[in-house]
Amino acid sequence: ILALTILTNVTSFGATAKKTSSKTVSQKQTSESRYGSNNVGYVTKPSNWFNFTDPNSSPNTVQLTMDGVNIITLDVILANGQATSNEAVLVTQERYLNSGIKKENITITNTSINGYKGKKIRISFPDGILYIVNYIDYNGNIYLVAQEGLPEYQNELSKVVNTWKPFK
């Protein structure tokens, strides 16, 4: 039941995560061009990309974008070993099926980013936008490494996603 309670919030991008003292502090670029936070992990930020803030995101969320439409989101679900990426991906699937997305527009696969394993869900929206979330199991928590945007930018977004690690 605790796992289900935790996972109920997974689609709100880590609503179960602890608040950081300052969102500005959690969203900083290091001199090595690694971008993120100790809470959600880091990606390599292309020099021509900029910070993005979704007002509905959790306090731990870190986002960046190339143009305001094609977006990378990093977040964490502090599961304390009570839930897994498999459960998170199934909750996400159920949420989108209940919102009217057809099952044939949702795929779930195993994923690995730099050796960190988990589950990936890919959702194709009727307007052409793709939303791909990698749920990575690490250290008892579930890290969310997501890309969303237009189909023609998915390869560029994937290149950034594939630089993710839980540390700098």
Image (tube, grey):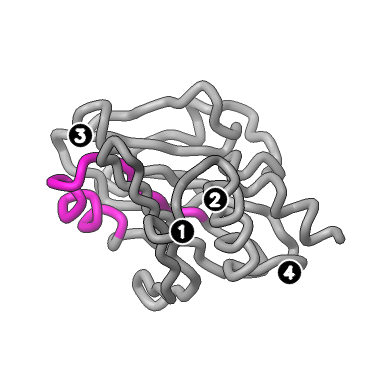
Is 150 covered by the magenta stretch?
A: yes
Q: Determine whether 166 is above or below 60 in the image.
A: below
Going by the picture, which residue comes out furthest to the top?
A: 55
Q: Few, some or many C-alpha atoms within 10 Å of disc 1 (few <14, some 14-19, many ≥20)?
A: few
Task: Kindly indicate whether the residue at mark 3 contacts the one at mark 4 (C-beta within 8 angstroms).
Answer: no
Image quadrant containing the N terminus? bottom right
Instruction: Give the distance between the C-alpha atoms of the residues marked 1 and 3, in whole angstroms.
Output: 30 Å
**Residue under pointer 2:** 97
Position of 7 compared to 127: left or right?
right
Label 3, on which residue? 66
What segment carries the magenta color? 144-161
Secondary structure under tag 4 reads loop
Whether residue 123 appears in magenta in the rendering, the answer is no
Name which quarter of the figure residue 16 lies in.
Answer: top right
Tell me, yes or no, whether the two marked residues, 1 and 3, touch with CB atoms within 8 Å: no
The numbered mark, 1 or 2, whose residue comes first in the sequence reads 2
Residue 12, how many percent across, how many down?
60, 39
Residue at image point 75% right, 52% down:
6
Circle nearer the viewer, 2 or 3: 2
Q: Residue 3: horizontal and vertical position, in percent?
A: 78, 61
Query: What residue is disc 1 on?
Result: 103
